[in-house]
Image (cartoon, rainbow, N blue to C red):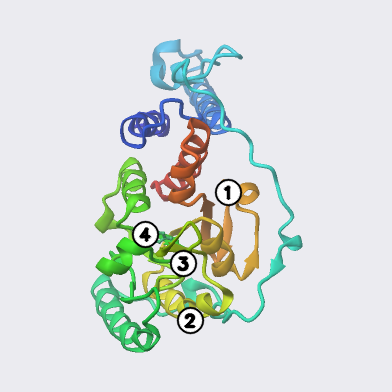
Amino acid sequence: MTKLDRLVEQWLQAEVAFGVLEVPIPRAKVQALREKARVVAGQAAAAAKAATGVRPPATVAPRAAARATPAPPARPAASAAIRPAPAPEPITLKLATPIKDLPPAPAGKLADEPQLSPEQKQTRMAELEKAAIAELSKHLGGSANRVVFGEGDAAASLMFIGEGPGAEEDATGRPFVGRSGQLLDKMIGAMGFTRPQVYIANITKLRCAEPDPMNPNRLKDRPPTSEEAALGLPWLHQQIAIIQPRVIVTLGAAALCFLRGQKLPVTQVRGQWLDYRGVPLMPTFHPSYVLRNYTTETRAKVWSDLQLVMQRLSPG
Ligand code: URA
């Protein structure tokens, strides 16, 4: 299967699994693949000519030749319904404001941390979970009834980081099991993974909520304060150090900003590669934002971010 075939397959997966009927096509990527195929076909032709003194017929490399055929300029490659991904606006990260009073991420690159086998990672993660539950249980009360540590494959190549548990997560002790979680499951499925193959964690391990002004008998989830984030972050940094994922996806502003220790505008930075200790970090919208703004445009933006992640994870 060629890279182009794989891309087309991914778009189809999105249509089925993520419910995006108009998937943005990474046109620059397709053009780059076409150009590469053209160069390879040219090199093959030149080599054949040098060896035989004869120009090879067009049938020598039919696949490459077919791929090398330039597309009509105004028509998308895969389907008339597909439209180009909007180019993300570049931002100057130097302008991002640091968030005060957060425990900093450990120094150095993740790759410099001890290299563990998958079995060692599972063991270390189980030990870390025990320690986190023992420590953070001291802070239960108010809106938090349980420590929601995180779950998934401790040796996963892909890690998702959210903000913090909501009511369903607090009730079950598992991350992303409510409505946002159901959408996250779809996103993971559309990317060709199952939930147990990735790792899902949050900035805070305890639910942050306050009385709902519309109904004071109910609690309404709210973003964590810096102090609340500071309580969860050391555990998250350790989780990431054990997993050493190849790619991190942050879901929403709180996850991105607290992980990076900087205030960053998700609407502007989503779709652009950032970095966490040398590991590529893709910021995207939180599933709850997608649910609140359930338009093709929002879903297509998220899907285009996830496609960049899939391309980064794909071999070769
Ligand atoms: N939202 C989050 O950010 N995390 C969860 O675990 C659930 C909802």
**Neighbour class for label 3 at 10 Å: few (<14), some, many (≥20)?**
some
For marks 4 and 2, give the one nearer the viewer: 2
For marks 1 and 2, give the one nearer the viewer: 2
Pointer 4 residue: 157
Looking at the image, is 243 positioned above or below residue 249? below
Q: Residue at x 28, y 66 (%)?
A: 174
Pointer 3 residue: 211
Pointer 2 residue: 231
Q: Amino acid at mark 1?
A: Arg
Mark earlier in primary sequence (2, 3): 3
- State the residue in front, 140 or 182: 140
Mark earlier in primary sequence (4, 3): 4
Q: Residue at x 50, y 40 (%)?
A: 293
Some atom of ligand 1 lies within 8 Å of the CB belonging to the residue at label 4: no
Pointer 1 residue: 270
Q: Are marks 1 and 2 in contact (CB under 8 Å)?
A: no
Mark earlier in primary sequence (4, 2): 4
Q: Amino acid at mark 2?
A: Leu
For marks 1 and 4, give the one nearer the viewer: 1
Q: Indicate the position of residue 98 as horizontal and vertical percent values.
A: 69, 71
Q: Are marks 4 and 2 in contact (CB under 8 Å)?
A: no
Q: Indicate the position of residue 31 as horizontal and vertical percent values.
A: 56, 27
For marks 4 and 3, give the one nearer the viewer: 3
Mark earlier in primary sequence (1, 2): 2
Q: Indicate the position of residue 91 as horizontal and vertical percent values.
A: 71, 51
Q: Quadrant of residue 78?
A: top left
